[in-house]
Amino acid sequence: MRTIDGAMDACSSVAFMPDSKRIITCGRNDYKITDIRTGEIVKRFLRYGVESYSMDISPDGKYLAAGGNGSVSGWPT
């Protein structure tokens, strides 16, 4: 088991990326892709002014979809 400290603030959702080497976490205003082995944040997506409650990764790991407060956003990973 590994605990990744500092990778998120208030975390409402977490999922493995399809490669099983990284996780993605959903915080209040951002999403972070974190390397499980090193704990390094490798990519961050910001959603200013919109709290996020959920997210999902496409099966191929190429896209992130996220929602909260009546809106949905998407990004390439």
Image: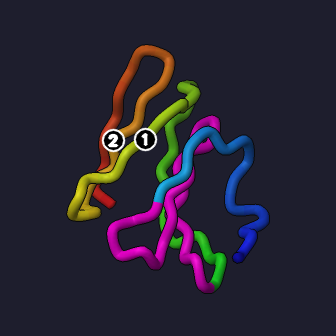
- Where's residue 19, x and y in %? 35, 76
The reply, left or right, for residue 47 in relation to residue 66 is right
x then y, percent, for residue 22: 48, 72
Q: With 14 as the anchor, is 60 left or right in this view?
A: left
Residue 54's spot in the image, x, y percent?
Answer: 48, 35
- SS for dot 2: strand
For the residues labelled 2 and 1, say whether their Cβ atoms are less than 8 Å apart.
yes
Mark 1, residue position: 55
Q: Quadrant of the C terminus?
A: bottom left
Above or below — where is 20 with respect to 58? Answer: below
Question: Which residue of the protein is positioned furthest toward the bottom in this rendering?
Answer: 37
Residue drawn where x is 54% and y is 57% of the image: 32
In percent of the image, x 33 and y 52: which residue is there? 57
Quarter of the N terminus within the rendering: bottom right
Where residue 70 is drawn, which disc sits there? Answer: none
Residue at 72% across / 69% down in the picture? 4
Name the disc covering residue 65, or none: 2
**Residue 34 among those drawn in magenta:** yes
Q: Residue furthest right?
A: 5
Q: Relative to 72, is 31 on the left or the right?
A: right
